[in-house]
Amino acid sequence: MKVWSLGDAVVDLIPLQNMQYEACAGGAPVNVAAGVAKLGQQSGFIGRVGEDAFGHFMQKTLFDLGVDTSTMEFDELHRTSTVLVSLQENGERDFTFLVADSADQFLTNKSLPVFEKDILHFCSLALVNPICRSTLDSAISKVKNSDSLLSFDINLRPQMWRDHEEMRAIIDEYAHKADILKLSEDELTWMTQEITLENALKKLADYPARLKVITQGSKGCLVLTPTTQVALSAFTVNCVDTTGAGDAFMSGLLAAVAEYGFC
């Protein structure tokens, strides 16, 4: 079972010292693709980058990690997405997107792979632009016809949407299509419009995903299947930087599903 991650490829500019920054390959789907490969499972990335230095840096980084990059597209008109990461004292982070209309938003369906009992993973940024969303629809159609699984990490980025009502409607629509659904506790509150966890979980039960995971930061996570609800505690660590933490979690989850099977 191969894990394909579709969506944004972002160069994260991570602050060092003296106003210097380190360029790191990022974007949630890229992070998941890299993580799955590092965990020894077959991994591929479906995405579009600019025909620029950052785009080729992204492709080489993934390739060197063992990720299948054969479906990556290079865009001569739009630049690779670039994000400035600002760290807060508690290790949480803020993102400033530096490139409008970045290449990842114009992903076409020309290079979609053949799915064979695989996993297709995506996040909500793949839904912002109608062009990329249409490509995702084509991929989902292939997934549903190939006995493959669809994984959706909400990974909400409101600043990338012009219309927040449209954002809510579209994300809700695709959340109902997923076999695996991952969201944070804050995203659960946002999606269900329920303040208490108990009421939010009741609404979440209406979503057909067979595996639902709610991450709760330092508290751990909730794992829900059609027959089971389990609360798992997190390891106690000194939090320095949470950038990519949710993606690392998702990598482990999907790598485990790929290796051991699905509920």
Image: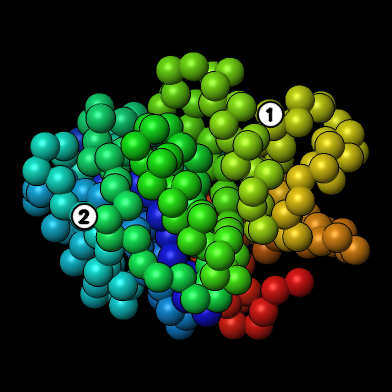
Tell me which residue sits at (56%, 65%) in the image: 145
Q: Nearer the viewer, residue 186 or 124?
A: 124
Judged from the image, the secondary structure of the residue bearing numbered disc 1 is helix
Kind of residue indicated by mark 2: Glu
Q: Is residue 121 left or right of residue 111?
A: right
Q: Which mark is residue 73?
A: 2
Tell me which residue sits at (48%, 32%) in the image: 157
Q: Nearer the viewer, mark 1 or mark 2?
A: 2
Residue 143's place in the image compared with 108, above or below, is: below
From the top left corner, tell me how far across and down residue 223 is, in percent: 77, 59
Tell me which residue sits at (21%, 62%) in the image: 59
Residue 66's place in the image compared with 213, above or below, is: below
Q: Nearer the viewer, residue 244 or 48?
A: 48
Q: Nearer the viewer, residue 125 or 110?
A: 110
Q: Which mark is residue 190?
A: 1
Is residue 154 visible in the rendered image? The answer is yes
Q: Pick whichever of labels 1 and 2 is earlier in the sequence.
A: 2
Q: Badge 1 local density, few (<14 within 10 Å), some, or many (20+)? A: some
Image quadrant assignment for residue 194: top right
Judged from the image, the secondary structure of the residue bearing numbered disc 2 is strand
Most extreme residue toward the front is 145
Placement of the C terminus among the 4 image quadrants: bottom right
Q: Badge 2 local density, few (<14 within 10 Å), some, or many (20+)? A: many
Residue 118's place in the image compared with 231, above or below, is: below
Q: How many labels sit on residues?
A: 2
Q: Is residue 110 left or right of residue 221?
A: left
Kind of residue indicated by mark 1: Trp
Q: How is the image coloured?
A: rainbow
Is residue 54 visible in the rendered image? The answer is no
Tell me which residue sits at (64%, 43%) in the image: 175
